[in-house]
Image (cartoon, grey):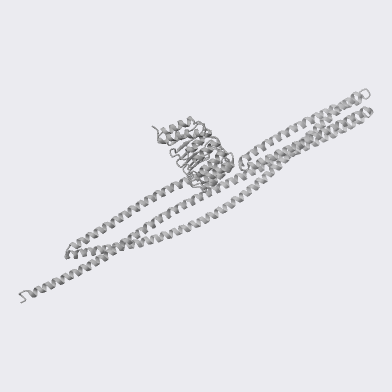
Amino acid sequence: MGTPEMDELQRSYVRLCHERGSEPQEAVLRQLEGARETAGGGRLDLSTQSLSMDSCEVLGILLQNDVTFTHVTLNDCMLSEEGSKHLLHGLRSNSVIKHLDLKGNNLRAEGAEVLGKFLRHNSSLISLTLEWNNLGMLDNAFSLFCDGLSFNQTLRKLDLRNNQINHTGAEELSMALKHNFSLQELDLRWNNMGLLGGRAMLSCMETNRNLLKLELSGNNIPSDILKAIEQAVEHNQERQTLKRDTVNQRQILTKEVQSLKQEKNKQFLNLMDTIDQQKEEMNRSNSRTTTLRLGKLQEALEDRKSVVNSLKSKLQMTEANLALSLQKALDVEKLLSHTKQTGISMREQQAKELRKEKEESASREAKLRQELASAHEKNLYYRSKVDELERRCKAQQQQLFDLKQELTDTGAELKIRAMQAEELLEAEKKRFRQSRDDTVVLHQKEVDHMARLLEDSEKAAQERMQRLEVTKLGLEEELNRLKVTLANERIHAAEEIQKVRSATQLEEQQHSAVLQDKLRTLAQSRDQAQNQVLQQQQQTGELQAQNSQLGLEIECLKRRIDGFNQELAKKEQQKLAEVTKARLELQERIGHLEAELVAQEGLKEKISTLERQLKVQSNSQREMMLDKEGEIASLVEKLRMKEAEILRMREEDAQRASLLQNAILSYIHRSPLNK
């Protein structure tokens, strides 16, 4: 048979569903029935059940004041934003639930806000699982979640795997962890925090001393930051173990002190009993035995006096030891203050040096970027020059082709009149063709060689830029801006190239028109063909001179490009060397700082242990002093009482002796012998 509480829960679920005009889900009823049949009914498992918004609202109302469930599992339920809002609103005032699982429900902005309110107002939850959600998509909503986490002081375990948390979300989470002092386990695997997020989590570990487990794999965080975070977590674990040990030692010491007090009370009671017994025996005994007992008591009192004197000497020795320990504690405090001051001065100096190095590295990076930009501009300038040279070569080739056509036309027309001129023209044509082919082949080879060199230089520059991007993760945004500017410059250069092409086309059209005019003039003035042939020969000579000049210019450009490539390689090597040196120096300084911090923490722990031992010793010695003073006072009072009793007994003996003497004298006076 089920418990009446579970039956009432089912009835109230059905009743609330009917009041809202919706049918109760059989899956929810089955789960409530299964929870009723389990031991104690403390677990509600609705995983992989598609819950409607009405059922979520009803469950939120039911769980608002429920005292039976301590574990609620709602993973892979495909909760809507409104449904999750109703559920968490109901669970917010529940003071019995300890574990909540919301894995794989695609919670986003509104879910993050509702979770922040839930964490702010709930005061009983210990474990919260939020794996496979999207809480970090919007920074504003995730900041509200982090605010709620900062106000919560009961949550010990939080799972935020696969929630798309970026570096801004990591910064918000680190600010929340600086104010949260109850969270002990945090899982942030498989997010997208990056370098900045890792630095933010490392900064929060400086103030948070309670986080004992932190998982950050799959976040693109550098290995050195992960090692630093692991060291901080290990320090927190060591502190926690030390706290536990100190608490256990305190409990043991308090128990021992209580046992000592009980033993002292027993001893005191035993002494009082023995004193009472002695008093009774003294009252019962005769006068003779009293003298003997008085002698024994005096001897016992002398022994006690010697014991008291020895205790006084011991107290003096303990006081001297306390004074020495206090002096040592003062010396240790002075050393601590001196070490703290030296540590603060060293930290300030190291912070200054780090700032200077950062500024120097920033200036170096700016210089290198400027040099890279200038080299890129020079490459673009040389490319434009090569394009212009290619255009000129093409124009010259076109001119040569047009001249060939003109020569063929003029040769055909002047075959009849000038055979000698034709022979000369054919020889000149052959020679011109050979020279043209040679120049074209040489020019084409040089252009191909230049293009290959440019492609190789571009590939090398791209590889070097990739290396720089890998090494400079922190400067990704600036590189993106530079890429945008480069893309704009390329677009601008393409527009300029298009403009130059259009201008060259217009020039070629004009030149073709001029050539057509020349052909017309040649057709009109056939008699001046020999003069034109001479002019063409002069033009070919000038073109050859121009080709030679262009070849020289291309060679100069090649040399300059090689020189620029060498300079770029040298500068990149220098930059890599400087970066490696700076990294090594930073790593060494970080290692020194960590060693100094570890030493300081060890000194602090030793000092704390010494202070605790001194406090314990001083407290124990004070208690011993108080107990001894009480014992001495009681013994002094007992001595006074014993002396009073001795005086009284002496007076009684004197009275008895006087009475006996009077009786003897009276008897002697009354005896017949005296008569």
In this picture, residue 318 sits left or right of residue 108: left
- Given the current orientation, which residue lies at the most extreme bottom position? 675
The quarter of the rendered structure image containing the C terminus is bottom left
Closer to us: 83 or 454: 83
Quadrant hosting residue 405? top right
Closer to us: 92 or 552: 92
Residue depicted at 44% across the width and 52% down the height? 606
Check the image and report above or below for 434 versus 359.
above
Residue depicted at 55% across the width and 49% down the height? 589
Residue depicted at 48% across the width and 29% down the height? 26
Closer to us: 366 or 255: 255
The quarter of the rendered structure image containing the N terminus is top left
Task: Residue 258: tell me if it is visible.
Answer: yes
- Given the current orientation, which residue lies at the most extreme top position? 416
Image location of residue 429, percent across then percent down: 85, 27
In this picture, residue 40 sits left or right of residue 373: left
In this picture, residue 643 sits left or right of residue 196: left
Quadrant hosting residue 142? top right
Task: Residue 219: tell me if it is visible.
Answer: no
Query: How many numbered marks have been drawn onto this rendered protein structure?
Result: 0
Image location of residue 364, percent across then percent down: 65, 47
Image location of residue 541, percent across then percent down: 85, 33
Image location of residue 76, percent across then percent down: 51, 33
Check the image and report above or below for 631 versus 559.
below
